[in-house]
Amino acid sequence: MSTARLDYHGDVAVITLDNPPVNALSHAHRTSIVAHLRAAEADATIRAVVLIGAGDAFCGGAEIREFNTPAALAEPITRQVAEAAESLKKPVIAALHKVAMGGGLELALGCHYRVAAPGAAIALPEVKLGILPGAGGTQRLPRAIGAKAALDMITSGDPMTSQAIAPLGLFDQIIETDLLEGAVAFARHVADAGMPLRRLRDESVKGTGIVELIAEARARMARDWRGYPAPARCVDALEAAVTLPFDEGIRFERKIFLELVETPESRALRHGFFAERATSKVPRLDPSARGHRLNAVAVIGAGTMGSGIAIALANAGLQVVLTDADGAALARARAYLDRTWSSAVERGRLDAAGKDRRLALIETSTDLASIARADLVIEAVYEDMTVKRAVFERIDAHARPDAVLATNTSSLDVDAIAAASSNPARVLGLHFFSPAHVMRLLEIVRGRATDDQSLATGLALARRLRKVGVVCGVCDGFIGNRMLEEYLRQAYFLVEEGASPQAVDQALEDWGFAMGPFRMMDMAGQDIGWAIRKRLSIDHPDKPYAQWPDRLCEAGRFGQKTGSGVYRYEPGSRQALRDPEAERIIADSVRLQGIEQRSVSAADIVERCVLALANEGARILEEGIAARASDIDVVYLTGYGFPRYRGGPMWHADTLGLAAVVDRLQAHAGERMGQTLSPAPLLRQLAVEGRRFNT
Ligand code: 3HC
């Protein structure tokens, strides 16, 4: 099947990459492009060739799904497609619009000239997939735009717009009018003027101070990207571009590419890429349900959460009605919003007009009747069932009858909250993570009665806010916090058993977590965990807890906000410091319980905490709370600081092998509280069948 088209515009051949959705370079597509290049070369009537993309992209790069399969190695590989363009005896012009990434940009770098539409996203994002540009990008880009800019693009993987990158020399023209027409005209001009076939391979890398630049980048990658093999290798490849002849540099790049693509880290990162995209495919949701058009959103409750949600909404250009019965709370929220946007202006992330535009979108009111014009109402009051139900009883009287109603809860029963409304079909849960304007994750809780239109509104909101929306069912804590409870249970037990809190935090941070459990709970508030434990110990009296965290809370040690928790904090500082007082409280608690302590290894700490996550994930999957294992991974990757290069708790368990996971969980059975790690039925079953969580 041909995935590229060849058309003739007089004496200019136009090859259109047409492989939806993003014209990725599958083997069939690569073959077809090369065939068309050869045909254009052989046709004596053709004087120049334009390469352009159909649909919404020039090209999103190599076909990632082919990696680690024979198709990825089948010739022509992407590098050879770029070489086919570069070695053509007629000028080849790449015309880029919307998206030119990875192998797509590398193909364009192989062309003799490049033109672009304004606003195209240009990137070499391979590093985010745990690899490096493997089709000549590390060698040609520094020759095109200089070592410094190329190093930044290749090591960050972040896109630049075509206008921003044009002054660096990547484009010969930005075409503001019709791209195809403009590119054909440019191609004809190149042919008419007899302009040379400009090959980047023949040029040298531009820039000064390159040796220092590379040394600095190498140190930065080692510091900032612990656990990720690709960033440092990107620097090595860039160094090769500077120090080696082109062909040797290309061979070096290929060798590293082939090494990296086989690493567990790259496989995990690619899992994360597809897992995020799979979240939008929701089972049992009518695909025609688009959700409500969102113009105005009401937020009830102007505390930290409500304010963060208001910022996120206004950042996305939505009108916001922020209500709170307490006028002083509204004034504090307004000041907080102002401060947040002012600091964005100071850091150059927003201009003054942008701040004013956002502030103008915010209306505050103490009158609940002001929610009347909202398409969506988000309740964000105190996390207490009675309080939330009381709000829902009142919402009905004021909200439009067709408005979608959402409760922002981190663990409460959404069905019980919905039951307080006269129409539970329009109620869903939206679990924002704090700070709501920063965190990418949004758990979208589908209640028993939630209708498709309301659920689709939640999904549309996530997209609008540029968040990853993961749909889940109703249970205590949903996906993320329910699993967190098991993780924390083990972390607290490990301290009772003899590990210091610092050792537990250190072991998990060394393993790759953004923050260890105790530092995290000190930040979130130890009192929150305390309240959850009190509630869960009534609902699940069978589940034991370590006792010392309650003793800390009884002493008023709620974490950063009270200046002390598991650690102590100097005023105004978030740095966790060892605290002999906390250690005394823990030691007293352990002594009173008569627990005999032992030495606990870092490996044990990681194993118990991380496998506890996967084990609870298995229960969540079995109960249908999550639609697929990869949704659980996404929750942990985007909301809980799980190391991306390990792919998420379920992917990690798959990587270990589920039979090995069952063995390891059982190995802890003899330890104090080891029974809390009893393998979940689904985990046992998949292990016996030799299957994985992620299919
Ligand atoms: N290979 C395979 N599938 C891809 C793909 C790729 N390179 N890029 C996107 N897709 C798929 C997505 O999985 C999704 O599929 P789905 O509809 O079945 O879920 C579909 O295309 C649309 O993608 P998005 O939902 O992400 O669409 P957006 O419009 O939001 O974004 C994009 C488009 C910016 C291209 C984004 O998809 C993206 O960042 N893609 C990855 C780009 C990338 O990393 N390229 C480098 C690939 S590796 C490479 O080129 C190696 C080379 O150096 C040899």
Image (spheres, rainbow, N blue to C red):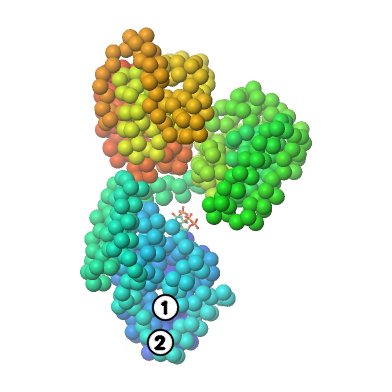
What is the secondary structure assignment of the residue under circle 2? loop
Question: What's the residue type where badge 1 is placed?
Answer: Tyr
- Say whether mark 1 is within 8 Å of ligand 1: no
How far is disc 2 from disc 1 in space, using C-alphas? 10 Å
Residue 562 can be seen in this image: yes
In the rendered view, would you say 284 is above or below 236?
A: above
- Say whether mark 2 is within 8 Å of ligand 1: no
Residue drawn at (40%, 87%) of the image: 195
Pick the residue in front: 78 or 342: 342
Where ligand 1 lies, by image quadrant?
bottom left
In the rendered view, would you say 520 is above or below 52?
A: above
Dots 2 and 1: beta carbons under 8 Å? yes
Which of the marked residues, 2 or 1, is nearer the chain's N terminus? Answer: 1
**Residue 247, horizontal then vertical, whole percent:** 24, 71
Pick the residue in front: 581 or 597: 581
Question: Residue 16 lies in what quarter of the image?
Answer: bottom left
Pick the residue in front: 190 or 565: 565
Left/right placement of residue 446 relative to residue 490 reads: right
Q: Tell me the quadrant of the picture where the N terminus can be found.
A: bottom left
Question: What's the residue type where badge 2 is placed?
Answer: Met
Q: Which residue does the numbered mark 2 point to in the structure image?
A: 195
Neighbourhood count class around disc 2 (C-alpha, 10 Å): few under 14, some 14–19, many 20 upward: few
